[in-house]
Amino acid sequence: MRRSWRSGCAVAAGVLAVVAMPATAHATPASGVSAVVLAQQTVGGKDYILREITLQPGGSTGWHYHDGTLYAYVRQGTLTHSDHTCATDGTYAAGTAFVEPSGPGRVHIGRNLGTTPVVLDVLYVDPAGSPLSEDAPNPGCPFR
């Protein structure tokens, strides 16, 4: 079987394109995190889910974002919250509350840099059927 020069170039170009593709970015999994659903209700096309989340010392949520809005209250410990620019956009101690807006442009991570567990009461207000969070790759920060 005889191949033409043109078909050989096409095959070579295809191989080069595959080899030159950037590596796929991988999500960063949570570590040292446990959660319990306390209540769940769907009303008017929205899921309202209340969870108790515990981050052990050294634990993190992994990089992620939410399809809906998240409302959190810190019951114990101190949560360090960082955004996609690697900046700490909040340090939340026991007795404080914070909000995480929705959307893939709001990638963030929560970390427990302290020596005691962080305990959060979290209310998710999501479009019905949405996951609680969407995994995201580390945006290039020196921590995870």
Image (cartoon, helix red, strand yellow):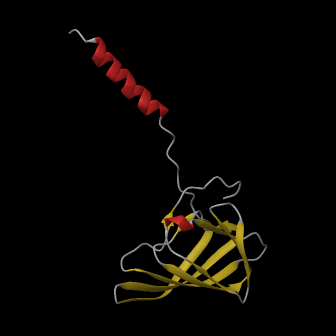
Residue closer to the observer: 117 or 11: 11
Q: Residue at position x 53%, y 68% from top?
A: 65
Of the 4 image quadrants, the one containing the N terminus is: top left
Where is residue 49? Give x, y as percent.
47, 85
Q: Residue at position x 47%, y 77% from top?
A: 68
Q: Is residue 79 visible?
A: no
Image quadrant in which you'd find residue 83: bottom right
Q: Is residue 107 left or right of residue 118?
A: left
Residue closer to the observer: 32 or 73: 73
Where is residue 119? Give x, y as percent.
66, 82
Q: Is residue 16 above or below residue 39?
A: above
Q: Is residue 14 above or below residue 2?
A: below
Q: Residue at position x 56%, y 68% from top?
A: 106
Where is residue 67? Give x, y as percent.
45, 73
Residue ranking furthest to the right: 115
Where is residue 125? Give x, y as percent.
47, 83
Image quadrant in which you'd find residue 18: top left
Instruction: Report the number of numbered marks.
Output: 0
Q: Is residue 3 visible?
A: yes
Q: Is residue 87 above or below residue 71?
A: above
Q: Residue at position x 35%, y 18% from top?
A: 9
Image quadrant in which you'd find residue 45: bottom left
